[in-house]
Amino acid sequence: MGGASNDMDIESTAHHEAGHIVVAAVQRLRLLPQGLGVDPQGEGLACYFKQPDASDLSVERVIVATFAGFKAQKHFCDESSHAPPPDYTEEIIRNSSGPPKACCSESLKNV
């Protein structure tokens, strides 16, 4: 175990999660102390806070940071990129109102 396909999964997930974190920081979303991680099985996690208000700009920033994972993964590892689920944007918008919430975007292999 731990062969080439697992290494490719880890690399692909690393690019995916890095895309989330880099763009979240550029969008001025607060990052959680847990930051970013990729485990030996190729599962990943990128954690950042949503903005405290439900303004269009705030929602847009979260959506951009969320989809940046897919974009980075596609750019660097096109053959193993995972497309976002069709209703992903609607779910982000639906969950964006109210007090600040943590938005931990996991690797979408199991979605």
Image (cartoon, rainbow, N blue to C red):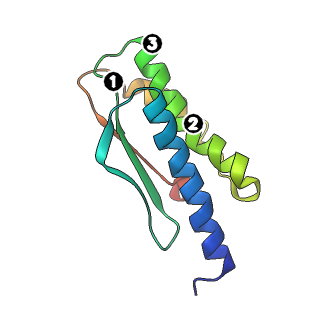
Task: Give the alpha-carbon distance from disc 3 to disc 1, as whole Å.
Answer: 11 Å
Total marks in image: 3
Task: Give the alpha-carbon distance from disc 1 to disc 2, as whole Å.
Answer: 17 Å
Looking at the image, which residue is at 33% across and 24% down?
Answer: 51
Residue 37 visible in the current orientation? yes
- The residue tagged 3 is 56
Is the residue marked by circle 1 packed among few (<14), some (14-19), or many (20+) residues within 10 Å?
Answer: many
Q: Is residue 13 left or right of residue 38?
A: right
User: First in sequence: mark 3 or mark 1?
Assistant: 1
Residue 105 vs 42, above or below: the answer is: above
- The residue tagged 1 is 51
> From the image, which quarter does the N terminus lie in?
bottom right
Are discs 1 and 2 less than 8 Å apart at CB?
A: no
Looking at the image, which residue is at 71% across and 55% down?
Answer: 77
Residue 29 image position (x, y, % from top left): 38, 29
What type is the residue that disc 3 sits on? Asp
Q: Which corner quadrant of the image does residue 31 belong to? A: top left
User: First in sequence: mark 1 or mark 2?
Assistant: 1
Are discs 3 and 1 less than 8 Å apart at CB?
A: no
Q: Secondary structure at mark 3?
A: helix
In the image, farthest residue toward the left: 99
Q: Is residue 101 left or right of residue 86?
A: left
User: First in sequence: mark 2 or mark 3?
Assistant: 3
- Looking at the rendered structure, which numbered label has been put on residue 67? 2
Residue 40 vs 90, above or below: the answer is: below
